[in-house]
Structure formats: C-alpha cells, structure tokens
Image: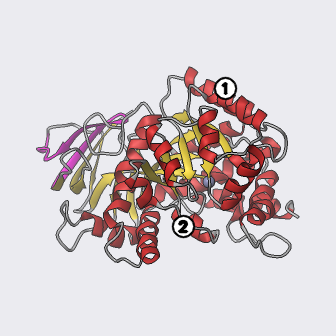
C-alpha cells in the first residue's frame, strides 16, 4: 500500500459540517484518508501526488441496488412478441437471460459493469445476483470482478422457487460464511431473495433461518403482481408476511416498495428497515415509481440504486426528483431530497453493511475519492452544490477515481486493466449468450 496526495482541489467533503474547501488537499495512506483541507507543502512525503487543477473532488458514490449480471442485455430484444407487462418482462427477458449465463459470463458481466461504475465515480456497489445455470460459486465470480477493478461490494444471490425450490439458498449461506471468516473488508454479504411472489412458504422459512444474523436484500411490491400473488396465496400483505418470518430489520434492504401502503411504510420505519428506490428502472418497465416522499414522511431510510439500468448514479437522482415533480405537477418538490438520498442515505445504508466507514472526505474514512473533470463556474457552497451535482456533474466526465486508496481510473481510463481486450472478449460472449435465449 502506498500514500497519495491530492492537491489544488475544490473539496466537497460531505462531512458533519458540510465543508467546501477551495484549493484543498487530501492525503491518503494505504486505503484510508489521513488528512483533508489546507495541507502545507512538505507536510507529507507522499509516494505519488495528483494536482486536481481546481476540479471538484468528492467521496466516491455508492449504488444501493444493482444487478451486474444484466450487462449483456444491452441492445438485446428477446424473441417473440414484446412483453406487455412486468410479468412477461421477467419471464421473456430477465429469467431467460440469467439462465443463459455461464460462470465466465458472470465474471465478465460484472467486470464490464464495474469498469463503467468506476468511470462514473462509483466506488461501492450493493449487488443482487442471479445465474441459475451456474449458481454454485457464482458470487466468487462477481467478487473476482470487484477485486480486479478494485471496488467494494456487498453481494447476495437471488433465491426463488422459479426454477427449483429454494434455489440459491446454499450459495448465500456459503458466501456469507466466506465473508465472515475473512479478515478482508472489501466484500460484504447479505442474504438475497427475489420477491414475495416467487418465494413459497417453505423456501421463505429456510431463508429466514439462514439469513437471520446477516440481513436480507429483497424486492418488495415492485408491481401489483407481487401484491396480488402474495394476497391470493398467503392471505396477507407483503410486509406482514416478511414481518412474520423476521425478514425486516436494520440490516435489511427492501427494493422498490412501490405498492406498499402507508401502514406497511410504518412497519418499515418501526423495524428500521431500509428501502431502495430505482426510478429509471420503474419508468423503463412502465411501472409506477416508488413514492419516495411518502417513505420519507414515514421516517424510512430511503436509498437509490440503478437496478441494472446503468452504473450511473447521478442520473438516478435526477430522474428521482424530475419524476416527483411531474407526477405531482409541483416544481418545488424533491430536489434536495433526491440529492440527500444519493449522498447521505446511501452512505448510511452502506455503513450498516460494511465495517469500514465511507462516504465523506474525513480522516479515518475509506479512501474512496473521485476527481470530477468539472471546474464550477458559478459559486460552489452548501446552498448551491446540489445544482452543480444534478446539472453539472451528471454531464461531466470523471478524471480520476481512487478506490480503497488505489487509482483505478486515470484520465477516464482504467490503467490496470486491458479495456479493449475485455470489451472485445465480452462482445463474443454476449453474442453467444443471445443465441442461447429462445
Ligand atoms: Zn432489482
């Protein structure tokens, strides 16, 4: 591990005092931030230094829900008539695509998506994985990609009964055990499940027992079909069912929650569970978007993810506030909330799942630092930053991404990886995957 000094940056610290520092420096030793602010020349003898040239420097972004395995779906249209609803979309596209993945595909789909994430300034990703034809050891393939790119990840396998009863339970158990027995803090684990509608009573009971000490990562009420199947089969609401099995809790992420009722939002709050919204994904599927303002009113910790749509987080925050405004026909809504969800709530979610603190330029935090190729041309301060974030940074390139103290993106490229060769290899793999889907 070496030391690194960033100088001449416009620092957005996101620390407790929300400090903005012009001409600031960040000193990193190993994978931790050691000092932040005005550092006199010669204070530290760093192995390497980077002049930020007045560009904006901030903590790496965090993605609270992703499906890295979806990478090879880009541009793919499944055979047959177009999906008319969410159920057909799952059955015609996603459940065929994930079945078509081989073990190497799992690695390369994660590798490509993580390379994109690093280039978009994202350094930690909470992923939800499925590859039913090669589930055994699949999370090791995803982990291998995280280590090759250099980012941090929280992984789980999506248990469901859709191919075989309880498929994926053992993979979650194995990976949770592996993370627990490892001294390494780069990777973390949750117990993954698909959704109430694909989890029968016996499977949910087994999952509840196996993941109780870890926490869960599960979709909830993404579409009415999840609510309807649960009501018909189990004679109760989704949250009542999850509560009965002990799934809710402070280490559990519920994804979407779009069709949860106010009473169920209160249950999320009273169990201190987390809710992750994915507005672009909801809109892409022609579904209602999670009512984030309602969840916030009910005191729920709301985060934001990409749900496999992309690896670009800032665009999600833009979609989040834009949707709220047009949905409510109110131009005053959700601007600050969307930014706070991205920057503060995703950090809070992460800090529940990982042992290393992150998400602020603060001594002791994990050295996940991004230099955006963006020099503000209007005043930059606490009361203007969100405008820079959503109107400036969302359209600018990342100059440098430092993840866990290591430069993983330099001038927009990943110096430690052969990007061209990887892309060429992935093109071949994608073409082969597409031919396996009928
Ligand atoms: Zn999802």
Q: Earlier in the sequence, mark 1 or mark 2?
A: 1
Kind of element beneath mark 2: helix
> Disc count in the image?
2
From the viewer's side, name the closer residue of 60 and 416: 60
Kind of element beneath mark 1: helix
Residue where numbered disc 2 is placed: 280
Query: With 166 as the anchor, is 370 left or right in this view?
Result: left
Residue where numbered disc 1 is placed: 209
Residue at point 19%, 37% (across, down): 44
From the viewer's side, name the closer residue of 16 and 39: 16
Dot 2 beta carbon under 8 Å from ligand 1: no
From which residue to which does the magenta span run?
A: 22-42
**Image quarter (top left, top right, bottom left or bottom right) of the C terminus:** bottom right
**Image quarter (top left, top right, bottom left or bottom right) of the N terminus:** top left
Query: With 21 as the anchor, is 432 left or right in this view?
Result: right
CA distance separating discs 1 and 2 = 33 Å
In the depicted structure, whether residue 209 falls above or below residue 259: above
In the depicted structure, whether residue 180 falls above or below residue 370: above
Q: Position of residue 371 (x, y in %)?
A: 33, 57
Q: Position of residue 181 (x, y in %)?
A: 57, 20
Secondary structure mainly formed by the magenta segment: strand
Q: Is residue 252 magenta?
A: no
Instruction: Mark 1: give few (<14), some (14-19) or many (20+) Cα within 10 Å.
Output: few
Residue 144 in sight in this render: no
Furthest residue to the right?
A: 438
Q: Is residue 27 magenta?
A: yes
């Amino acid at each position: 591990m070496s030391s690194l000094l960033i100088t001449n940056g416009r620092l957005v610290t996101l620390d407790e005092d929300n400090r903005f520092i012009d001409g600031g420096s960040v000193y990193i030793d190993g994978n931790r931030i050691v000092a932040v602010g005005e550092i006199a020349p010669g204070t530290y003898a760093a192995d390497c230094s980077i002049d930020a040239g007045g560009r904006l420097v901030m903590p790496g972004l965090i993605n609270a829900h992703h499906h890295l395995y979806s990478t090879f779906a880009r541009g793919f249209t499944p055979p047959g008539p177009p999906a008319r609803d969410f159920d057909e979309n799952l059955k015609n596209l996603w459940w065929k695509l994930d079945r078509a993945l081989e073990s190497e595909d799992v690695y390369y789909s994660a590798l490509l998506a993580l390379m994109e994430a690093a280039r978009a300034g994202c350094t930690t990703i909470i992923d939800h994985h499925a590859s039913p034809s090669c589930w055994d050891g699949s999370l090791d393939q995803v982990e291998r990609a995280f280590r090759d790119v250099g980012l941090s990840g929280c992984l789980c396998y999506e248990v469901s009964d859709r191919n075989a009863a309880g498929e994926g339970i053992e993979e979650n158990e194995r990976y949770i055990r592996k993370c627990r027995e490892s001294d390494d803090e780069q990777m973390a684990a949750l117990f993954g499940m698909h959704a109430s509608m694909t989890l029968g009573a016996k499977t949910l009971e087994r999952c509840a027992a196996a993941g109780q000490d870890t926490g869960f990562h599960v979709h909830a009420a993404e579409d009415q079909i999840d609510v309807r199947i649960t009501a018909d089969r189990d004679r109760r609401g989704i949250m009542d069912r999850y509560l009965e099995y002990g799934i809710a809790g402070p280490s559990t992420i519920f994804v979407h929650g779009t069709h949860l009722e106010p009473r169920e939002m209160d249950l999320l709050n009273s169990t201190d569970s987390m809710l992750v919204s994915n507005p672009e994904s909801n809109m892409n599927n022609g579904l209602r978007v999670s009512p984030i303002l309602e969840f916030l009113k009910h005191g729920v910790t709301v985060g934001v993810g990409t749900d496999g749509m992309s690896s670009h987080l800032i665009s999600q925050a833009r979609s989040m506030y834009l949707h709220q405004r047009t949905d409510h026909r109110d131009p005053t809504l959700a601007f600050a909330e969307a930014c706070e969800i991205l920057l503060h709530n995703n950090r809070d979610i992460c800090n529940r799942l990982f042992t290393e603190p992150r998400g602020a330029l603060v001594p002791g935090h994990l050295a996940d630092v991004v230099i955006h190729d963006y020099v503000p041309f209007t005043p930059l301060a606490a009361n203007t930053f969100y405008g820079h974030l959503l109107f400036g940074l969302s359209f600018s390139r990342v100059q440098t991404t430092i993840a866990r103290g290591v430069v993983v993106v330099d001038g927009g490229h990943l110096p430690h990886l052969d990007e061209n060769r990887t892309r060429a290899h992935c093109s071949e793999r994608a073409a082969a995957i597409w031919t396996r889907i009928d």
